Amino acid sequence: MKKSEKAVENHRSFYPCSSAVMCAFADDAGMTEQEASAAARPMAGGRMGKCGAVLAAETVLARKYGTHDARIEELNRRFIEKHRSVICRELKSGAVKSPCRSCVTDAAEILESLLDGADV
C-alpha cells in the first residue's frame, strides 16, 4: 500500500486530518507512529489556521530536508492549485468547500510525490 493510501485509510479510521498524514509518513519524519500522532495533534481541525493535513505534510518535509527546503513551498503551491487555499476555515466553510478527506488525499499524494523526487 502506498503511503498516501495509508493516510486516506487512517482518515477513514477516524484519525484527525493531521494525524492521518503524519502517521502514514512517520518513518520519513524519523518518528514512530506514536510520536507522529502526538506531534500532529495540535495541528488538527484548523487549530493553527492552516489545514492540518498540509501542516503535517510540511512537518514531514521539514524534518527530512530542513525547514527552508523548496519542497515545502512546492507542497503549498500544488495544494493551492487544487484547492485555492491552505486555510482550514476557507476550505471548510468558505467559497472553496473542500472536504477533509479530499485535503488529506491531496496533501498525502503531493507529499509522496515530493518524497519520491518529483521535480521541485
Image: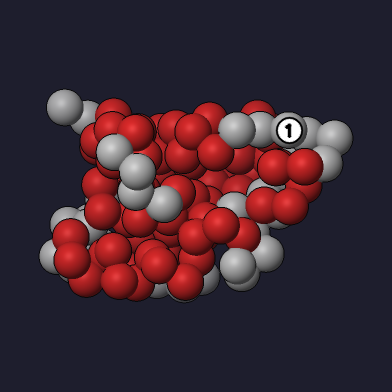
Quadrant of the rendered image containing residue 96 = top right
Percent position of residue 91, x then y: 71, 42
Q: Residue at x 22, y 30 (%)?
A: 2
Residue 79 lies, with reference to residue 26, above or below; the image says above
Q: Position of residue 23 (x, y in %)?
A: 26, 54
Q: Position of 89 compared to 77: left or right?
A: right
Residue at 77% in and 42% down: 93
As drawn, which residue projects farthest toward the front?
A: 14
- Left or right: residue 92 versus residue 4 is right
Specify whether residue 86 is in view.
yes
Residue type at the position of mark 1: Lys
* Colour logic: secondary structure
Closer to the camera in the image, 118 or 86 = 86
Residue at 18 percent of width and 60 percent of height: 33
**Count of marks placed on residues:** 1
On the rendered image, what quadrant is the N terminus found in? top left
Residue visible at 46% across and 39% down in the picture: 104
**Crowding near pointer 1: few (<14 within 10 Å), some, many (20+)?**
some
**Element assignment for label 1:** loop
Whether 29 is drawn above or below 8: the answer is: below
Q: Report whether residue 106 is seen.
A: no
Q: Position of residue 16 (x, y in %)?
A: 41, 52
Say which residue label 1 marks: 97
Whole-percent x and y of residue 101?
Answer: 49, 33
